[in-house]
Image (cartoon, rainbow, N blue to C red):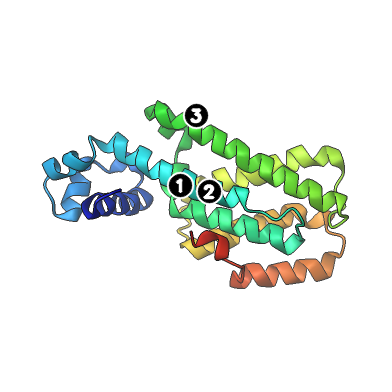
Amino acid sequence: MATKTAERILFTSLDLFNEHGETAVTSVDIAMELDISPGNLYYHFKGKEVIVLALFDMYRHKLSRILAAPDPDLSLQDFFCFLYLSLDCSSLFRFLYRNPTDLMEKYPALSRGFRQLLLTREETVARQLDYLRRNQQLKLPADSLAPLSEQIGLVFSQAANYYLIKEQMLDQKGFIQKCLGSILFLLRPYLKGDSEDVGVLKELIGELRFNQESSDE
């Protein structure tokens, strides 16, 4: 069980990584932010790599629970609730998506788990889209499942970098709304009750009125 100091180190590191990027933050920066000595930080975490891997384990645990949670009897609104929960979780650990390729090269111990997590999320999205297709909630050809799931995966994994390059600073709510809006745009041609469903989903996205029980773990 983590000590209070270890927890403070992790959450302070997460805040600094999210704000500045992992590369720009050193162990000394973290210690100074906490007003503790570098030696005290090193006592709890033997270097920045250990902190990064511990934060990734936290992210993997939270996201894995979300990926395992979807009800098989899925509605379109349920699907967007799932997308919201996934994005909400990822935005809490958004430093992982700032330069993910560089991060995986720098920390090889992280790369396999990160790739597996992205693959699992894409497969989960594909299964949910297939259910909506078979349940006739989406007019989606079977051969569109894989590319559409991949496009949604790109929104998840590349949106943070895209807005960073544009110097478009979004808060967590704004980022999630942008991503959900992009996914709705991708799905819109396949919605059966186009105007009604789109209107309801736009309202939910605008207010982020989704059931958050699954994210309270």
Which of the two labelled residues, at mark 2 and mark 3, occupies the earlier sequence position? 2
Image location (x, y in percent) of residue 81: 64, 61
- Left or right: where does residue 70 sit relative to residue 143? left
Residue pictured at 42% horizontal, 42% vertical: 57
Q: Is residue 137 above or below residue 134?
A: below
Marks 2 and 1, how far apart at CA: 6 Å
Q: Can you tell which quarter of the image residue 116 is in?
A: top right
In the picture of the structure, the residue carrying the numbered disc 3 is 112
SS at badge 2 = helix
**Type of amino acid under label 1:** Tyr
**Type of amino acid under label 3:** Arg
Marks 3 and 1, how far apart at CA: 14 Å
Which sits in the foreground, 115 or 6? 6
Question: Contact (CB < 8 A) between labels 2 and 3?
Answer: no
Marks 2 and 3, how far apart at CA: 16 Å
**Type of amino acid under label 2:** Leu
Question: Contact (CB < 8 A) between labels 3 and 1?
Answer: no
In the picture of the structure, the residue carrying the numbered disc 1 is 59
Image location (x, y in percent) of residue 6: 25, 49
Q: Can you tell which quarter of the image residue 127 is in?
A: top right
Instruction: Using the image, tell me which numbered label, if any, was put on residue 151.
Output: none
Which sits in the foreground, 171 or 91? 91
Can you see residue 165? Answer: no
Badge 1 density bin: few <14, some 14–19, many ≥20, Cα 10 Å: some
Q: Is residue 172 above or below residue 3?
A: below
Can you see residue 15? Answer: yes
Q: Is residue 126 above or below residue 172?
A: above
Residue pictured at 86% horizontal, 65% vertical: 193
SS at badge 3 = helix
- Left or right: where does residue 16 sit relative to residue 66? left
In the picture of the structure, the residue carrying the numbered disc 2 is 63
Q: Which residue is most to the front?
A: 1
